[in-house]
Amino acid sequence: MRRYAQDVVALTRKDLLLELRARDTLPAMLLFVAAALVVFHFALPGDSSELAAKGLLWVALVFTALLGLVRAFAAEREQGLLDGLVLAPCDRSAIWLAKALAMLAFLVLAEVVALPLYSLFYSGVGWETIAGVALADVGICAVGTLLAAMAAASRARELMLPLLFLPLAVPIVIGGVGASVGPSGGRYLGLLAVYDAIFAIISWASFEYVVTE
Amino acid sequence: MLVSAAVALIFFWVPEDADQGFSQKIFYFHVPIALTAYACFGWGAWKGLVHLWKRTPEADLESYVAIHLGVIFGVLTLITGSIWAKASWGVWWTWSSRQLVLFLVLFLFYSAYFMLRFSVEPGPPRANISAVYALFGVVLIPVSFLAIRLADDFIHPTVFRPSGPNMAGSMFFVFCLSWAALLVLAATLYGIELTSKRLDASVRELREALE
């Protein structure tokens, strides 16, 4: 158990350090989410409601996450590192957990910028939205990291991930939008929590099969 | 034969629905087709699990064929559902029919399954990835169902209640017969496609051995 935690911490540190040095992903995510929020202002008709903007906020967040996830295994693939990681004497699910944690860190940082920006441009965000975003992040990173590993094994790579990810993200968007706009936000937060728990467990259990033969 | 018997009974024997008249008859196709599609997806995921567990290459092919059939039945569900929606609610598509929305999501999900499968080189990694994705699908079905149910007030009729089916005895009998017919049809198609895929594979092996 301790050993497992050490492996996860070491692998997460590797990903964060790599990002700190190369600055590949996070600046792109920040710029993308800001640009998306500006584009949405022009996409919405002038007299449209605050609710429509809340829905678009979720679109922006899901696509920003997708942008980061597409790059999740880029370094490993370009350097042929994934085989080395798989051969390392650690549990394979630790690779998934570490990658998902690093992705979660990027996504949370992107949202720390995006949510204030949203409340500046459109309308304030309540605690339900923040709780919904936090719960959705966990689900997005858990499922997204596993799917990114799948997509990395295919020929189409970057093209494949959105196709795999978006149908699975439908419950996240339903839960997130429901929590942000609905009168009964608590039920939707419950849905997000259930989604996180179920998909985190099956992603954790099945990652080994995705990266090995 | 079971299929033709079901069709005959649907059109000539069952009393017409008091509220919707003739168009209600599509119920005997639409709902059994949807349930058969679920059965195919479930069977595909089960075979995927068997593959991950026992590492049998046949299970991978069986899983693929089951999901292939599931997608065909899923498309039929969307088409019959759309026709029924037009007949009884006057629109081709309505977002408040949660079963149809669920099938649309599943259709997108399983289409991505094919994209993924044909984009990975054949071999054990492809079998593993397909199996894991098929398992995700069968988990996605109840989660999306829950989500869509939460999200919408509905006009989709709820025929099956916990207290039992909400229809006349003869209707229920024909419904069950129709469902059984479609399940038999699906099983037959499954057998045929599996045989042809296996023949294909053995022909390819023979050709490679000859070269």
Image (tube, coloured by chain):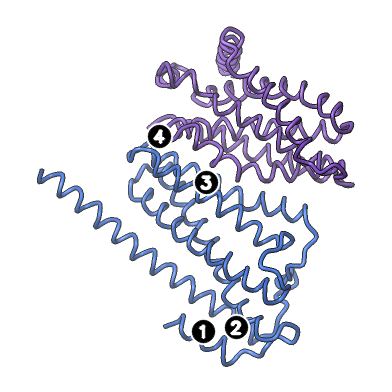
Residue A10 pos. (x, y %): 57, 12
Mark 1 vs mark 4: in front: 4
Residue A144 pos. (x, y %): 59, 33
Is B206 on the left or on the right of A48, as rendered? left
Instruction: Report the amino acid beneath label 1.
Output: Val
Between the C-alphas of marks 1 and 4, the distance is 45 Å
The one of B86 and B70 positioned closer to us in this rendering? B86
Between the C-alphas of marks 4 and 3, the distance is 22 Å
Q: Which chain appears purple?
A: A
Give the residue pinned by disc 1: B7
Instruction: Report the amino acid beneath label 2.
Output: Phe
Secondary structure under tag 2 reads: helix
Q: Which chain appears blue?
A: B
Residue B34 visible at all: no
Q: Give me the residue at 54% from left, 42% from top.
A: A163
Between the C-alphas of marks 1 and 3, the distance is 34 Å
N-terminal of the two: label 2 or label 3?
Answer: 3
Return the chain for callout 2.
Answer: B
Secondary structure under tag 1 reads: helix
Return the chain for callout 1.
Answer: B
Q: Bin the neighbour count of mark 1 within 10 Å (Cα to Cα): few under 14, some 14-19, many 20 and up.
A: some
On screen, residue B205 above or below B75: above
Give the residue pinned by disc 2: B173
Return the chain for callout 3.
Answer: B
Q: Bin the neighbour count of mark 4 within 10 Å (Cα to Cα): few under 14, some 14-19, many 20 and up.
A: some
Q: Residue furthest bottom?
A: B12
Mark 4 vs mark 3: in front: 4
Q: Quadrant of residue B97?
A: bottom right
Mark 1 vs mark 3: in front: 1
N-terminal of the two: label 1 or label 3?
Answer: 1
Q: Give me the residue at 81% from left, 39% from top.
A: A53
Mark 2 vs mark 1: in front: 1
